[in-house]
Amino acid sequence: MAHQSDIYWLSVAAEQSLIPISVKKNPRVGAVIVDKSGLAVAKSFHEGYASPHAEKVALDKARGKAKGATMFVSLCPCNHIGKNPSCCVEIINRGIKRVVYSQVDPNPIAQGGVEFLKSNGVEVNFVKTPKKFENINNRWLKSFELNRPFVTAKIAMTLDGKIDDKTNKRFRITGKDVELEVHQIRNGCDAIISGTGTVLLDNPRLTVRYPKRLKNAYQPIRYIVGDREIPQDYFIHDNSAPTMFTGKRTPRLILEDLLRLDVRTVLLETGSKLLKDFLDHDLVDEMVLYVAPTIIGQGKALVEEILQANSNREYKISSVGLVGKDLRIKVSLR
Ligand SMILES: NC(=O)c1ccc[n+]([C@@H]2O[C@H](COP(=O)([O-])OP(=O)(O)OC[C@H]3O[C@@H](n4cnc5c(N)ncnc54)[C@H](OP(=O)(O)O)[C@@H]3O)[C@@H](O)[C@H]2O)c1
């Protein structure tokens, strides 16, 4: 059984991992170094793609106090040299006596850390992630299992289930609070996929802009699918985010393309055509549905026209909540 103090310090490490605004293309990782007397001498977190790993930051903060101490880290330390030096080598060189970790890194290039540490005299223990934090890297971990990016579809609909009003005019379904929340969802993703249908009709920016502190954060890739040309004066051509355009292609090819760019989490912000194609190919993992208290009568219906073909799927509601005047339902598809 895990020691209570190990669970406590792993919770502190997990809390650290939640500090950065975003960690694009990378997992959230936090670390704490605790000395022989049981005092925390350094706490740290990983700030995302190409930033120093949490272990290295903690070791630099702890300096000489790392010798003989225990490192608690939320993800197993890596043993490869990439954009950063091997964390295991740093841990050994700095004299850490024991490492306690709580999540296994599924990334093939990060393997071998535990064996390497043990063979160099470091005691290593695995302790299960404290319950409250076990979902922190869920979508990132799932992406390795699926060998493709994890796909979240954001869908706004009216009370009578319509996702657009078929008038070919821009039509806002949900309120301001949902708009703000969607910026946070975008911020948690490596790429946003949209179709030319949506871009031509709505002229969306597809960037993270609220709250203001997110504006300068690393923007997700805007990935636009479809053969039609988008006029140069549309927002999608501004330089506010990396943007890719690709002709009409299957959802599987779209995801393969994004995986080659190290994209692990994507958000679908599409109209019914592309959304249906992803659902038909069984390539949506989670839906975030926003239901507005409006009835419009006419329009494209989510249930009849899009979801019906997928009615033999297993859907699980993972959470329900109010966002301003609208309802949010999170649905997991496996
Ligand atoms: N309620 C919501 O949450 C929500 C979200 C987004 C959009 N919308 C609404 O949806 C409407 C636009 O609907 P839409 O269906 O035209 O937009 P869409 O699904 O975003 O775009 C459809 C277009 O994408 C291209 N495409 C590329 N690969 C495809 C594939 N594998 N499968 C299907 N399409 C592919 C095709 O364009 P090409 O002909 O150029 O090849 C197709 O016409 C707008 O009214 C918009 O406001 C609603």
Image (tube, grey):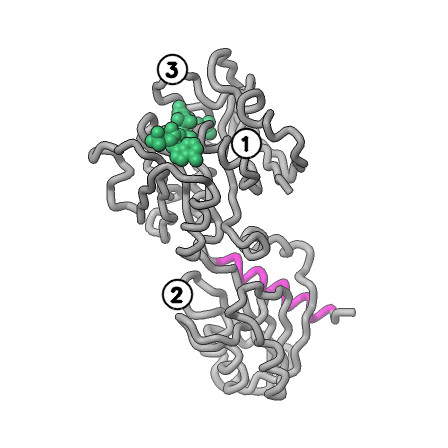
Which residue is rendered at x = 54% and y = 67% of the image?
Answer: 108
Tell me the tag on residue 167: 3
Q: Disc 2 or 3, which lies upstream in sequence?
A: 2
The kind of residue tagged 1 is: Leu
Regarding residue 329, the answer to whether it shows in the image is yes
Q: Residue 212 vs residue 138: left or right?
A: left
Q: Disc 3 or 1, which lies upstream in sequence?
A: 3
Which residue is rendered at x = 49% and y = 65% of the image?
Answer: 45
Tell me the tag on residue 289: 1
Q: Residue 180 vs residue 79: left or right?
A: left
Question: Which quadrant of the figure has residue 1?
Answer: bottom right
Which residue is rendered at x = 47% and y = 16% of the image?
Answer: 299
224 or 309, which is in the foreground?
Answer: 309
The kind of residue tagged 3 is: Thr
247 or 236, which is in the foreground?
Answer: 247
Circle 1 crowding by C-alpha within 10 Å: few under 14, some 14–19, many from 20: some
Report which residue position mark 2 lands on. Answer: 50
Q: Please tell me whether mark 2 or mark 3 is closer to you in this view.
A: 3
Residue 302 placement (x, y as % from top left): 54, 24
Magenta stretch bounds: 4-19
